[in-house]
Amino acid sequence: MDNQTFFDQVRGSLIVSAQAPDGHPLRDRHTLTFLARAAEAGGSTAIRCGGYGGLDDVRAIVDAVNVPVIGLTKEGDTGVYITPSVHSAVAVARAGATVVAIDATLRPRQDGSTFAEQVAAVHAEGALAMADIATAEEAEAAITAGADLISTTLAGYTEHREKTVGPDLALIREIRERLGNEVFLIGEGRFHNPQHVRQGRASGADAIIVGTAITDTKWITEQFVAAADE
């Protein structure tokens, strides 16, 4: 799938992330696959997946859904750990992902590669490269390096930007102001309700990725339990 076809499919829409870390009650490949299928049935135009389930989760969900898959690996839990090497990026593309999500923060990668080298390797496999960033400067650098699209996935999760309560709408606006309307921009991170999604779109995001608030039954239950205790 070329980038314009992907953009046309997901523009103005919701994308669901179906992931669960090790030790989480939902850390089961079959369960996550069913969550992805349910999200597709509900209208999600793509699925973000992989994470600590890695390539096997990507393969299973690619086989189970009829929408594009944004795939990734998570290797470690500090520094650059989202698809952190050229080898990882190529492996995700070969697992069937339409888009490979890569940490594009300005931090050293595990294999000493550059983000541009990862992008080139993904493009050589016929996949698209999505830059997971934390700052507008990183978004700008990622586009210069050849990224096909940007996601605010890491906003508030590195030392370079303070974590906001709810989504970082200011970052979405700043990226749009810096890079213009030609860059495909996804809002991701702490979108916890439909109002957040509307705000993200109004701030300039072309699409929104939601994970926890849709697919993490544990987190959703905790919100209702807290409300019951008030």
Image (tube, helix red, strand yellow):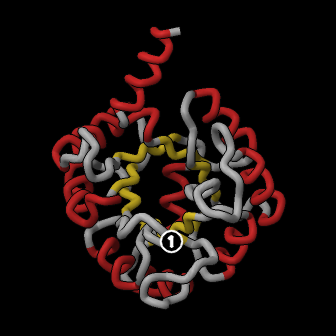
State the residue at coordinates (60%, 53%).
186
Q: In which quarter of the image is residue 95?
A: bottom left
Q: In which quarter of the image is residue 8?
A: bottom right
Residue 112 in the image, given as x and y percentages of width and height: 48, 90
State the residue at coordinates (54%, 87%).
114
Left of 195 or right of it: where is 71?
A: left
Q: Compared with residue 141, is residue 179 higher up or lower down, i.e. above or below? A: above
Question: Which residue in the rendered view is the most extreme toward the right?
Answer: 177
Left of 123 or right of it: where is 186?
A: right
Task: Say few, some or many: other residues with alpha carbon within 10 Å of mark 1 (under 14 / 14 to 19 / 20 or more).
Answer: some
Residue 129 makes an appearance in the image: no
From the viewer's side, name the closer residue of 124 and 138: 138
State the residue at coordinates (47%, 45%).
15
Residue 146 makes an appearance in the image: yes
Residue 109 in the image, given as x and y percentages of width and height: 49, 82
Residue 157 in the image, given as x and y percentages of width and height: 58, 57
Secondary structure of residue under mark 1? loop
Left of 25 or right of it: where is 103?
A: right
Query: Which residue position is annotated with label 1?
Result: 79
State the residue at coordinates (22%, 61%).
59
**What type is the residue that disc 1 sits on?**
Gly
Residue 80 in the image, given as x and y percentages of width and height: 49, 72
Question: Which residue in the rendered view is the most extreme toward the left?
Answer: 30
Q: In which quarter of the image is residue 51?
A: bottom left
From the viewer's side, name the closer residue of 142 and 133: 133
From the viewer's side, name the closer residue of 206 and 230: 230
Left of 187 or right of it: where is 49?
A: left
Question: Is the N terminus in the top left, top right, bottom left or bottom right quadrant?
Answer: bottom left
Query: Exactly how many numbered labels are in the figure?
Result: 1
